[in-house]
Amino acid sequence: MIQLILGGARSGKSRLAETIAKDSNLDVSYIATAQVLDDEMQVRVEHHQLQRSDHWTLIEEPLYLAEKLIEIDRENHLILVDCLTLWMSNLLLDTRQELQQVECEKLLGTLKILKSEIILVSNETGLGVVPMGQISRKFVDESGRLHQQLGQIADKVTFCVAGFPMVLKGEKA
């Protein structure tokens, strides 16, 4: 099963994903895509670390998500990826222009063949004003495209607002 959980900043999406993972009674691998490049991000990472179970395997992968998913995939296993928008930022800021497209295509293909349960967490970026800068607009555009493609292959899509999950696709939609 593939679950996509979307929401704005501090919407409760990570908390929901972590609760689902804890309640699954499966072995959990948590893939963190963040790169700690400043003090503010360090504080965010530490906050997330406090929320996670000590029994989970932590894997840090800022770029090559599909390869990591294949590497750790197995039966009776849940992989929680948090978050795809940080992953997209990492790809867009990489100097190799083709990397973003290649890695997104790999991810979409890989998700269809995995044996593990998958929970993908991502920020919904399409609800605000259109950004003024080119890289910001590209980020919103590419994140939105990825979310649409993931929504098509996901078994369940949930949108979080103010800590309340709204199921958009799948069980209880």
Image (cartoon, rainbow, N blue to C red):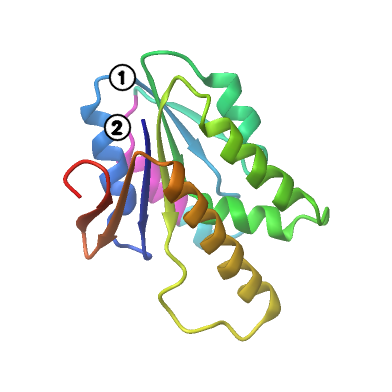
Q: Is residue 147 above or below residue 102?
A: below
Q: Residue at x 30, y 39 (%)?
A: 18
Local secondary structure at mark 1: loop
- Amino acid type, mark 1: Leu
Q: Residue 71 in magenta?
A: no
Q: Locate residue 9, reporting x and y percent.
A: 38, 65
Describe residue 108's horizontal placement relative to residue 99 as left or right. Answer: left
| Mark 1 neighbour density, 10 Å: few (under 14) some (14–19) many (20 or more) | some
Asked if disc 1 and disc 2 are in contact, CB closer than 8 Å, the reply is: yes
- How far apart marks 1 and 2 lie (CA) works out to 8 Å
Q: Quadrant of residue 145?
A: bottom right
Q: Nearer the viewer, residue 14 or 129?
A: 129
Q: Locate residue 154, reporting x and y percent.
A: 40, 41
Q: Residue 51 in magenta?
A: yes
Q: Which of the labelled discs sits on residue 26, or is there none? A: 1
Q: Residue at x 61, y 28 (%)?
A: 68
Dominant secondary structure of the residues highlighted in magenta in the image: helix
Give the residue number, with chain letter if any, for mark 2: 21
Residue 36 seen by the camera = no
Marks 1 and 2, the one that precedes in the sequence = 2
> Disc count in the image?
2
Residue 159 seen by the camera = yes
Q: Which quadrant does the N terminus fall into?
A: top left
Q: Residue at x 68, y 73 (%)?
A: 135
Residue that extends furthest to the right in the rendered view of this protein:
96
Q: Locate residue 98, reporting x and y percent.
A: 80, 52
Q: Nearer the viewer, residue 84 or 109?
A: 109
- Amino acid type, mark 2: Ala
- Please give the range of residues in magenta: 44-54
Describe residue 42's horizontal placement relative to residue 79 as left or right. Answer: right
Q: Nearer the viewer, residue 150 or 85?
A: 150
